[in-house]
Image (tube, rainbow, N blue to C red):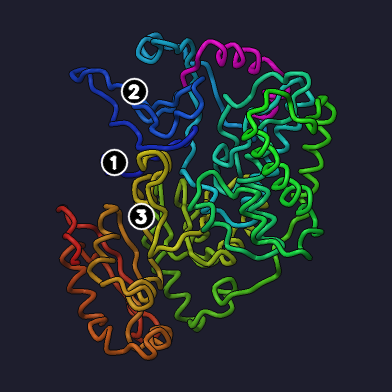
Amino acid sequence: MTSPALRRGSQIDPQHGHGEMPQPPRTDQQKPTPMTPEPGSFRDPGNQVFYLDEQVFRTLDAESAAHWHQLRQTTFFQALVKREAVVATETEDRPGVREQALSGRWTELLRHERIPFVSYPYEWTFNMLKDAALLQLGILEDALANGWTLKDGSAYNVQWRGQRPVFIDVSSFEPYRPGESWIGYRQFCMMFLIPLLLKAHRDIDTAALCRSDLEGIDPEEALKFISVRDIFRRGVLSHIYLHARLQARARRAEAAVSSAPPKWAIRQTAEMTLRMVQSLGRLVSKLERRDARTSWSAYEETHSYDDGSFSQKKDFVERHVRGRRWPLVYDLGCNTGTFSRLCSEHADCIVAIDQDELAVDTLYRRIKTPASGNIIPLVMPLSNVSPDQGWRGRERKSFEHRARPDLILCLALIHHMVVSANIPLRNFLDWIRAFGASVILEFVGPDDEMTLQLLKNRRNVHSGYTQEAFESVARSMFDILDSAPLKGGRRRIYLLQPKAQEPTEASA
């Protein structure tokens, strides 16, 4: 399903999902802009997320509204919002907005802070997923200590303000019921703990597994990746092996259609649940991925530039980035984020993307220390970006459908897309053009040593990959506002502005 065109620079807010932001604010001559429901916000029947004039709202039913009015008065919740662990939220009091939103079962309306860009757990690095897990466990620990709990353990309840995770689903808080264990435990394991354990102990690409199943990795499925020796590694026995066995046992009991509670059911106290959550936190905090290194994770040491050429490249980018404020920048093929960091003082939000998970994790670890930042690092193969997924393809939006950037950095990427991924030059430029953003693009010529390395045993296949061919195609879609040679002319960097026309249809 194709989503409506997004406004350039507008963002999407992911309360229980995501979706395109509403249309521009109305004038006095226009009819009131209707609230746009978030298509991914339907799994919790007690609330619904809506958008109106680039603001994010949540409607609540009577029970959820009662919980909210209790929650907002608690000291622990106020402290979580103050330290920016939980998204800022207020009751919406404007009569006109409330009249439009509250009907049927909805009795209360909340307004949320906007999150700069939506991302999903299968796009996060190991350390991002780990920090998101620790955030959610820390919030749950505070809640339990104050008579509250979280009714789920979804990784989609966490988003990012730059390099800092933030919990976005305030409707997940509910009063703790005596005797209950944490009902979100299984979901937390599938979306957080099991992916972290498999990555830490087996170095498995769990992102691909989580992208294929939005519910996460089932314990019984995870057990297939575990050897006998692995069972006694930290966390595996209790949270994968025994979890899978108990799950299978429970399924057999359900099949027996017995109304009696299972003999292994244990009545939990709040103290027992709190200790379990604290134990999970200690486990997650100690998990580390295997020490590894790729050529891209050490980009600053292994790139093919001499100091002079690299300085020329940085000067070109900085010259065209400074002088204005960019609401949203995409750095496609960011490696370890050298140019994301260079542009950060001129942008509100930078989404830095690369398919090399170690390179992106290097960037994340470098920028996570400051108290604030505006770079969101993501892992994604740009020849196979995250697609529309979930119910009717609308719960999780594709990368292309989430927002419109104002500027795209596309530096030393094109030869990987055209030569390695076999994407025709025109198709690639048409994809970039479709975002409607200004573009700083580095063309890596056919005589560059990096291109020659990619062209081994396939030179005749890409005989049309030349600077002349690139410029010819580029001029059909963009105005070339500036360019400069790099590396003795083996590369050239361009400032491109999309022409005021529909994107050229990509060739088959």
384 in magenta? no
User: What is the secondary structure assignment of the residue under circle 1?
Assistant: loop
Eyeballing the image, is 364 above or below 257?
below
Q: Residue sitting at 41 percent across and 12 percent down?
A: 102
Which quarter shows the C terminus?
bottom left
Q: State how far apart marks 1 and 2 are (Cα).
A: 16 Å
Is residue 450 left or right of 506 when viewed as pictured?
right
- For residue 35, the mark is 2
User: What is the secondary structure assignment of the residue under circle 3?
Assistant: strand
Eyeballing the image, is 151 above or below 310?
above
User: What is the secondary structure assignment of the residue under circle 2?
Assistant: loop
Q: Looking at the magenta stretch, what is its main secondary structure?
A: helix
Label 1 crowd (10 A; few <14 / some 14-19 / many >=20) = some
Of tags 1 and 2, the one toward the viewer is: 1
User: Label 3 belongs to which residue?
Assistant: 407
The part of the chain drawn in magenta is 58-81
Q: Earlier in the sequence, mark 1 or mark 2?
A: 1
Q: Residue sitting at 55 percent across and 24 percent down?
A: 89
